[in-house]
């Protein structure tokens, strides 16, 4: 696990974008196409802003997969992750092959349909974050470390839902959906390379547990310790509790 520390979220985001661009450029040069997974949320904004600003990648040759989405939330809602990806990544880059999770449809059917597309070929790069409760995608603790299904329907715990309120996506806990579609832990680990982008002091305890604690479903992101090619991007806040920052 390769850990990089930065002074602030902006410089962190730029560095992560530089690394992602190198990975994608290499894959595109070798094969003419690339498959990626993108995360959403406040923690990814500086990263995605820097990535789309580069202008040196063949985005029409990139196939994008969606990490997670709330069940029952319309795309018009400001917290919709489909809307987030359309506004911050798909429209600015011109990506044409995007497999978005439609939380307004039958969730089991969505899991099957997008899951088949995802499992059709290897993923070159997964860009993920870590939640305040240690979640990876919407796999809240205790996460299912066994299922091989590409996407699963999950119930969000109270800590995860409070984070969404704290980040300003919803006005109250009652407004946050209780269920979501999430890429499974094992499917995320199938990616050839993983970039984990985690700014902010409020993530410090989750980062410490994920990077320095045991691998356990109680800290879903701890599973990243088992992947052979993970790069972690932290700022001084998120790294503040590490014994070896």
Image: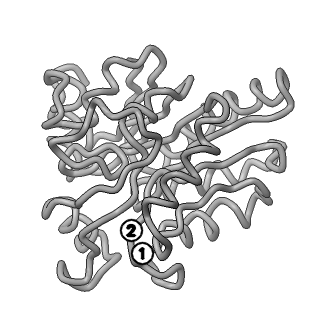
In the visual, does 131 lie left or right of 40? left
Question: Based on the displayed image, in which of its 4 quarters is residue 18 positioned?
Answer: top right
Could you tell me which residue is drawn at 28 percent across and 35 percent down? 221
The x and y percentages for residue 24 are: 71, 33
Q: Quadrant of the C terminus?
A: top left
Q: CA distance from mark 1 to mark 2?
A: 9 Å
Sequence order check, earlier mark of 1 and 2:
2
Could you tell me which residue is drawn at 24 percent across and 37 percent down? 220
Question: Based on the displayed image, in which of its 4 quarters is residue 2 positioned?
Answer: top left
Element under label 1?
loop
Callout 2: 10 Å neighbours few (<14), some, many (20+)?
many
Tell me if label 1 and label 2 are in contact, CB under 8 Å. Answer: yes
Could you tell me which residue is drawn at 29 percent across and 40 percent down? 236
The x and y percentages for residue 198 are: 36, 43
Which residue in the protein does label 2 denote?
70
Element under label 2?
strand
């Amino acid at each position: 696990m390769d850990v990089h520390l930065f002074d602030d979220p902006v410089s962190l985001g730029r560095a992560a974008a530089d690394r992602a661009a190198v990975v994608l450029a290499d894959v595109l040069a070798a094969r003419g196409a690339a498959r990626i997974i993108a995360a959403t949320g406040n923690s990814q904004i500086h990263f995605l802003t820097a990535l789309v600003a580069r202008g040196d990648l063949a985005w029409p040759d990139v196939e994008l997969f969606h990490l997670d989405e709330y069940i029952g939330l319309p795309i018009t809602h400001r917290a919709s992750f489909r809307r987030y990806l359309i506004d911050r990544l798909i429209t600015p880059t011109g990506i044409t092959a995007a497999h978005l999770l439609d939380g307004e449809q039958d969730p089991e059917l969505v899991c099957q349909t997008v899951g088949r597309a995802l499992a059709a070929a290897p993923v070159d790069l997964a860009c993920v974050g870590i939640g305040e409760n240690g979640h990876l995608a919407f796999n809240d603790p205790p996460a299912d470390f066994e299922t091989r299904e590409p996407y699963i329907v999950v119930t969000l715990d109270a800590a995860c839902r409070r984070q969404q309120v704290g980040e300003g996506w919803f006005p109250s806990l009652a407004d946050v959906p209780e269920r979501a579609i999430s890429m499974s832990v094992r499917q995320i680990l199938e990616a050839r390379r993983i970039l984990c982008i985690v700014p902010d002091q409020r993530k410090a305890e989750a980062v410490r547990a994920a990077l320095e604690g045991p691998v356990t479903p109680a800290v879903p992101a701890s599973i990243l310790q088992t992947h052979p090619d993970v790069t972690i991007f932290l700022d001084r806040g998120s790294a503040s509790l590490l014994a070896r920052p």
